[in-house]
């Protein structure tokens, strides 16, 4: 074997590197995941000499001399995607979009490419998974004006590098990074070495020629981008496209973003003409809420900078077993257990012989502590079988002493509730002053869970 190559073993699950084979990965504790791969020791992932990114000698620069125009943003045509990206597609950025197979990654990116191309941008869509005919069929289905959109069906990295270097499009999509391979690496496409090599090569191309590159990455059943976690460290932005296979909504969530906040989410709906933005997710989440039912409470959670209403449902019923069941869908089960314990201890209500099921209807996961108060109220409402007024919105964090603590952006939450026709808001007492006096909204300050129990008295 050539001197500049060495053999190492990689965990195919998390990318852990080892000089020898191991049965269990010390990092992710998975069994039987080590595979031998050949890596190049010299400039792993680097470009051959003479293909430097700019040709100029390497020299540090003063930070004040760096022009801000270097980070110009391009609108993707989707407000939801732009927001998750932190205000549009950054020139020369490398973005990874992960998600389950069939969730709509290719569809979303093809739509974005179509919009950009019809706006006069040069766009190259590189697919290693589908034939040009398949992609064309999809493009026709989503009825996008595909303009000058160029397609390339190729999986060889050297070829792709050559094409990108020659064409220098403004935006390129690689669908998917797991199908790309370099000839002189002996391991199979999708293995840690290959994916890492591909990501490094695309990073160089993105920075060198100011191409905004989107990488599509498949996700394993554990919910990480298949095999290489390493990929997440290398790229500028990591987005996950998630959603229930059986429902039509899709949520695009930022996990890492070098150019913006990571808390933002974008909501889409998969229709027969492709993905359509959901500009008002609150209305969408509340559609079908039962009127006058016990155990149903509308909560307000903030995702990134956007307040969003959602219905919290609780069903508390007598348990037939020794150990009561606790189930949570769309929120954290540990948090639910904690809140149930607070209710038992602070309100003296026995729940130890009751099963409890909590559901955030609509299907978007909400883990914000501000949901606590709504969960507690829903549990009480179901336990007492008394409905909460339909025009009430609830938010606030609940502590172990039963106290209701302040949450951020109280005013925006109240305004969002007002927009959707709600007239009463239960919120932490400490937040009431900060909210002011919004028109047509009654504010009820809650300082502890005891105040909630009084609502039903
Ligand atoms: P796709 O973009 O191929 O998923 P990924 O690239 O993430 O694997 O998504 C395809 C799915 O979306 C497929 O199950 C069919 C569905 N779909 C629609 O419902 N409407 C459409 O207009 C299109 C193009 C796809
Ligand atoms: Mg696809």
Image (cartoon, helix red, strand yellow):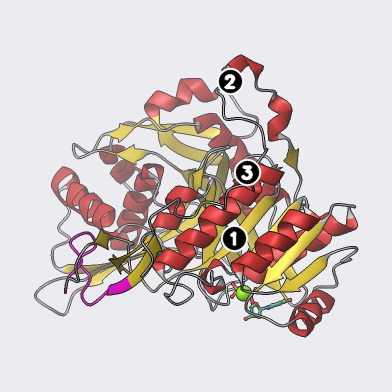
> Could you say where residue 236 lies in the image, as x and y percent from the top left?
54, 45
* Residue 291 visible in the shown view: no
Residue visible at 45% across and 58% down in the picture: 365
Tell me if 239 is positioned left or right of 54 in this view.
Answer: left
Residue under label 2: 61
SS at badge 1: strand
Q: Quadrant of ligand 2?
A: bottom right
Marks 3/2: CA–CA distance: 18 Å
Q: Nearer the viewer, residue 241 or 421?
A: 241
Quadrant containing the N terminus in the rendered view: bottom left
Q: Residue at x 32, y 50 (%)?
A: 376
Disc on the earlier residue, 3 or 2: 3
Q: Which residues are magenta?
A: 23-36
Residue at 55 percent across and 23 percent down: it is 60
Say which element carries label 2: loop
Q: Can you tell which quarter of the image residue 226 is in? A: bottom left
Q: Which residue is mark 1?
A: 215
Q: Is mark 1 within 8 Å of ligand 2?
A: no
Residue 434 located left or right of residue 149: left
The residue that label 3 is drawn on is 52
Question: How many residues crowd around disc 1 within 10 Å: few (fewer than 14), some, or many (20 or more)?
Answer: many
**Nearer the viewer's eye, disc 1 or disc 2?**
2
Mark 3 → mark 1, Cα distance in angstroms: 22 Å
Q: Position of residue 377 (x, y in %)?
A: 35, 50
Give the SS element for disc 3: loop
In the rendered image, residue 181, in percent from the top left (x then y), is placed at 54, 71
- For this orientation, the residue located farthest to the left is 322
Q: Is residue 447 visible?
A: yes
Residue 404's x, y, as percent?
31, 35
Q: Is residue 43 above or below residue 143?
A: above
Q: Is residue 412 above or below residue 242?
A: above
Q: Is residue 24 magenta?
A: yes
């Amino acid at each position: 074997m050539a001197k500049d190559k060495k053999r190492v073993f990689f965990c195919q699950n998390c990318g852990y590197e080892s000089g020898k084979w191991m049965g269990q990965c010390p990092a992710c504790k998975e069994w039987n995941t080590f595979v031998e791969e050949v890596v190049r020791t010299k400039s792993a992932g680097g470009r051959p000499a003479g293909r430097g990114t700019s040709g100029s000698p390497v020299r540090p620069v003063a930070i004040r001399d760096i022009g801000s125009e270097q980070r110009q943003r391009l609108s993707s045509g989707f407000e939801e995607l732009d927001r998750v990206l932190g205000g549009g597609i950054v020139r020369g950025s490398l973005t990874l979009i992960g998600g389950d197979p069939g969730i709509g990654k290719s569809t979303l990116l093809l739509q974005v490419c179509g919009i950009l191309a019809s706006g006069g941008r040069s766009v190259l869509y590189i697919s290693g998974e589908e034939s040009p005919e398949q992609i064309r069929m999809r493009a026709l289905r989503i009825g996008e004006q595909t303009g000058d959109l160029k397609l390339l069906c190729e999986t060889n990295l050297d070829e792709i590098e050559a094409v990108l270097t020659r064409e220098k499009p403004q935006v390129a999509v690689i669908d998917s990074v797991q199908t790309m391979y370099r000839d002189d690496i002996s391991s199979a496409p999708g293995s840690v070495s290959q994916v890492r090599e591909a990501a490094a090569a695309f990073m160089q191309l993105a920075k060198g020629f100011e191409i905004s590159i989107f990488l599509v990455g498949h996700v394993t059943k554990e919910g990480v981008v298949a095999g290489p976690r390493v990929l997440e460290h290398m790229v500028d932005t990591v987005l996950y496209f998630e959603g229930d296979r059986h429902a039509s909504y899709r949520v695009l969530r930022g996990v890492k973003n070098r150019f913006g906040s990571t808390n933002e989410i974008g909501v889409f709906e998969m229709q027969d003409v492709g993905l359509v933005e959901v500009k008002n997710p609150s209305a969408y989440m509340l559609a079908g809420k039962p009127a006058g039912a016990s155990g149903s409470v509308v909560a307000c959670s903030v995702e990134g900078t956007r307040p969003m209403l959602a219905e919290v449902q609780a069903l508390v019923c007598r348990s037939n077993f020794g150990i009561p069941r606790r189930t949570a869908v769309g929120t954290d089960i540990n948090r639910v257990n904690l809140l149930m314990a607070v209710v038992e201890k602070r309100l003296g209500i026995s729940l130890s012989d009751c099963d409890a099921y909590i559901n955030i209807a609509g299907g978007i996961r909400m883990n914000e502590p501000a949901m606590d108060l709504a969960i507690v109220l829903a549990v009480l409402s179901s336990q007492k079988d008394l409905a909460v007024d339909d025009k009430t919105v609830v938010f606030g964090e609940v502590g172990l002493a039963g106290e209701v603590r302040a949450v951020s952006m109280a005013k925006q939450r109240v305004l969002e509730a007002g927009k959707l026709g709600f007239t009463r808001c239960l919120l932490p007492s400490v937040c009431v002053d900060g909210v002011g006096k919004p028109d047509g909204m009654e504010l009820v300050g809650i300082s502890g869970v005891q105040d909630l129990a009084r609502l039903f008295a």
